[in-house]
Image (cartoon, helix red, strand yellow):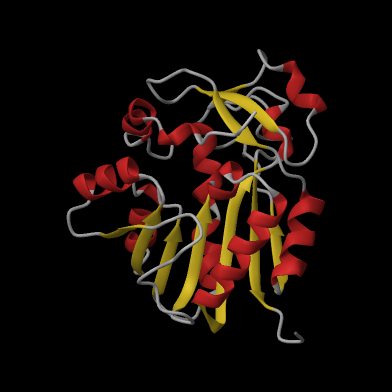
Amino acid sequence: MEFKNSYSDSVRAESYSKLGFPNTYFLAFRDLAAIIFKYVKGTKALDFGCGTGRSTRYLNNLGFETTGVDISEEMIRLAKDRDRKGQYQLIKEDRFDGLAKQSFDLILSAFTFDNIPDFNKRIHLLIRLRSLMKHDGIVILLDSTPEIYFHEWASFSTKDFPENRKAKGGDPVKIIMKDVEDKRAVEDIIWFEEDYKFSFDMAGFELLETAKPLGRDNEPFVWINETSIAPWVIYVLGNNHEL
C-alpha cells in the first residue's frame, strides 16, 4: 500500500498548527538550542519540512534569519497565517527552486524524515540538503527513535498498535498524538539508527554528534517512559571533507 503523508490532511494540519512544546515535545527542543550554538557559526537557517512554522519560529527566536519550506500547501498557508513576518516557501518534493546552493549556515529538519519513505529517496534528499549548506554549515535532523512507536508517552500512545514492534526499517507504523484535538492515528515511517548512519555516509555527511534527550524528575511534566527511554534522536551532520 502506498504511504500517504498524514499531515497532507487539512483537518490534521489545522489541529497540528495549534501545537506548541508540551510534554514529550518539550524534550525534542529542550537541548536543541545548546546543540545549535555549539556547532553553527552563522545566522542564516533553513527549516526543511517546516509544517505550520513551529520550528521556524523557534529558530527565529534564537536569532536566525530563517526560511521555512514544506511540500504541503495547507501547512505553508497556516504557517503564514500564524507568522505574518516569517519567510515561508512551498517546494516540490524533489526540487528546491529558489533556494541558493551553499547559502545556509544551518539546515534543521524537525520530524520531517519520519514521513519520508523509500531509502533511496531519503539519500537523494540528504544530498540535496548538503548542496544547500555552506562549506562549514551544519545539518541537524530531529526525528523519532524507533522506541517511540513501542511504548506509552506523555504526548503519545501506541498501545493499540502492537504490530509496530514487528516493523523493519522503512515500514509504516502508527501512533496517536494526545496533545492535539485530532486523535486519529498518525502513520509514520520507522527508521533505525543504522539506517540513518548509512544514509549519512551515502550522502557525504560526517556524523558529528548523536543526542537522545531524556526527561528529568525535576521537570514539570508527568513522564511515563521519558526518563528511561529516549523518544527523540538528534543527529548533527557536517560536510565530509574527505570526499
* Quadrant of the rendering where the C terminus is positioned: bottom right
* Quadrant of the rendering where the N terminus is positioned: top right
In the rendered image, residue 180, in percent from the top left (x then y), is placed at 40, 25
Examine the image and state in which quarter residue 198 appears.
bottom right
Query: Is residue 28 shown above or below 120?
Result: above
| Residue in view at x 39 percent, y 58 percent | 91
In the rendered image, residue 71, in percent from the top left (x then y), is placed at 41, 50
Examine the image and state in which quarter residue 228 appears.
top right
Query: Is residue 13 shown above or below 207?
Result: above
In the rendered image, residue 149, in percent from the top left (x then y), is placed at 68, 29
Relative horizontal placement of residue 122, taking residue 32 as reference (left or right)? right
Count of number-bearing discs: 0
| Residue in view at x 74 percent, y 61 percent | 199
| Residue in view at x 67 percent, y 61 percent | 123
Query: Is residue 171 shown above or below 82?
Result: above
Depth check, front residue: 158 or 75? 75
Relative horizontal placement of residue 86, taking residue 127 as reference (left or right)? left
| Residue in view at x 73 percent, y 55 percent | 196
Query: Is residue 224 shown above or below 192?
Result: above
Depth check, front residue: 67 or 228? 67
Residue located farthest toward the front when viewing the structure as drawn: 1
In the rendered image, residue 48, in percent from the top left (x then y), is placed at 46, 58
Relative horizontal placement of residue 47, taking residue 60 as reference (left or right)? right
